[in-house]
Image: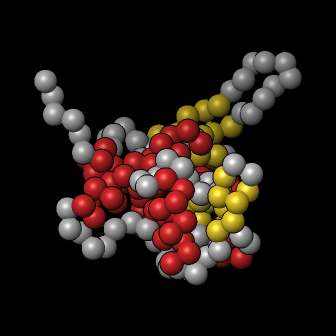
Amino acid sequence: MAKKKSWREKLRGNPDLPSIKELYNEAEPPRLTGWMVIPSPSEVYEIMRQVPAGKLITALEIRSILARRHGADLACPMTTGIFIGIAAQAAEEAASEGEREIVPYWRTLKSGGILNEKYPGGQEEQRRRLEGEGHQVVARGKHLGVLDYEESLLDEDQFDS
């Protein structure tokens, strides 16, 4: 039986990524068409790694940066979300093995400033880390979110194209 890949092995990803796919839809009325990038896990990780303390980024901003870098109309929301989760798990895996400097995944929020329940430790651990950096976390219905998160968003133009 093959050994299960570690999170960091998964982060190194697929050699076929990134890739650009053409979107087309023959439905009436036509839906989204154009070009979509399917990013590599390491690209998503690298963007998350660059978010400094006190700043935040959302999955939507990560997708926008990826699309711009690749000259695409959008970045795949599903794979980007999966790779955000892999980056978080890989960071905790590294921390559990004694690494002190890990990707600050807790600074990456879901759309609308919502905390990610799928991160290691769930929303409560993300809340603890964010509040430790000065952010105020509040209840938003069934979820937790960062109050006035827009004020702390990192400017997308700060990322390399």
Q: Quadrant of the N terminus?
A: top left
Q: Observer-nearest residue: 160 or 62?
A: 62
| Residue at the right extreme, as displayed | 29
Please indicate, yes or no, whether residue 66 appears anywhere in the rendered image. no
Q: Which residue is at a point 50% across and 40% down the rendered structure image?
A: 79
Residue 155: percent from left, percent from top: 64, 73
Instruction: Report the side of 153 relative to 29 (left or right).
Output: left
Q: Which residue is at a point 50% across and 69% down the rendered structure image?
A: 128
Q: Observer-nearest residue: 117 or 88?
A: 117
Residue 103: percent from left, percent from top: 39, 66
Model colouring: secondary structure
| Residue at the top extreme, as displayed | 27
Instruction: Report the side of 152 relative to 106 (left or right).
Output: right
Count of labels in the image: 0
Does residue 7 lie above or below 33 as drawn? below
Q: Which residue is at a point 40% across and 48% down the rendered structure image?
A: 86
Residue 38: percent from left, percent from top: 51, 41
Please indicate, yes or no, whether residue 147 appears anywhere in the rendered image. yes
Instruction: Report the side of 98 relative to 105 (left or right).
Output: left
Query: Hey, which quadrant is residue 32 in on the image?
Result: top right
Query: Hey, which quadrant is residue 154 in on the image?
Result: bottom right
Q: Quadrant of the C terminus?
A: bottom right
Does residue 126 lie above or below 100 as drawn? above
Q: Which residue is at a point 48% across and 43% down the rendered structure image?
A: 82
